[in-house]
Image: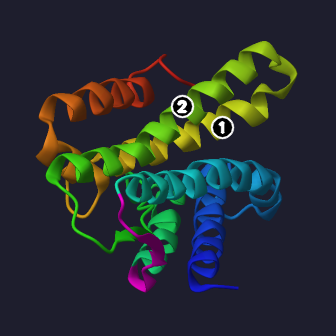
Amino acid sequence: MDREKRDLIISWATITLAFSMVLSENALDLFSFFEVLPIAALGVGSGFILHELAHKYVSIHYGAHAEFRAWDKGLMLVIVSAILVAFGWFPFLFAAPGAVYIMEHVSRKQNGIISLAGPLTNIVIGVAFIFLGVVFPLFSKLFFPVAWINFSLGLFNLIPIPPLDGSKVLAWNGLVWAVFFIPLALFIFLPGFFRF
């Protein structure tokens, strides 16, 4: 197995465990943890893996070689922040276990578009799972949390702080950044907008 695949699998597993802790009704309840584990695995599998592959393949579209690399400190921060969130001691999950590294030079606009590709993928997947939850309400307990995971990953990555995607999108075009960040933040945080 090559390094990129290994790093993606390790990062996927780490974020899955983290979201399982966050989604559990009780941080110390193993039954609740294992009950939400498959939901977290699907949410992170769709949200994290496809997010990173979107960065990679848009980079390739611009003629740049790009590969995902895990970040050891980031992996630890994912778990530590998940524990803190699960116990109510921290407001959000730090979900940055690594990044797609672009090996060649790209323009500011290209870098902005490459960076937007990941969160945009999360938004599209999130909308698709909400649609599925509405069309198939019997499975809404699966589809809505998967949508929430995708929206959360998209919003987190759009925070305009380096090295997150939002800083590169904002450096390219502030209006484009705002068009995606503000509605997503309202959708997740305003009461009544999105609850599962």
Is 187 on the left-hand or right-hand side of 168? Answer: right
Of the 4 image quadrants, the one containing the N terminus is bottom right
Q: Which mark is residue 145?
A: 1
| Mark 2, residue position | 124
- In the image, what residue occupies the spot 63% across and 85% down? 2
Residue 22's x, y, as percent? 58, 54
- In the image, what residue occupies the spot 72% across and 50% down? 42
Q: Amino acid at mark 2?
A: Val
Question: Which one is nearer the viewer's eye here, 86 or 140?
Answer: 140
Rendered view: 48 above or below 192: below
- In the image, what residue occupies the spot 36% across and 71% down? 101
Rendered view: 96 above or below 92: below
Q: Is residue 80 magenta?
A: no
Rendered view: 33 above or below 137: below
Q: Residue furthest right?
A: 138
The quadrant in which residue 189 appears is top left
What span is in magenta?
A: 63-73
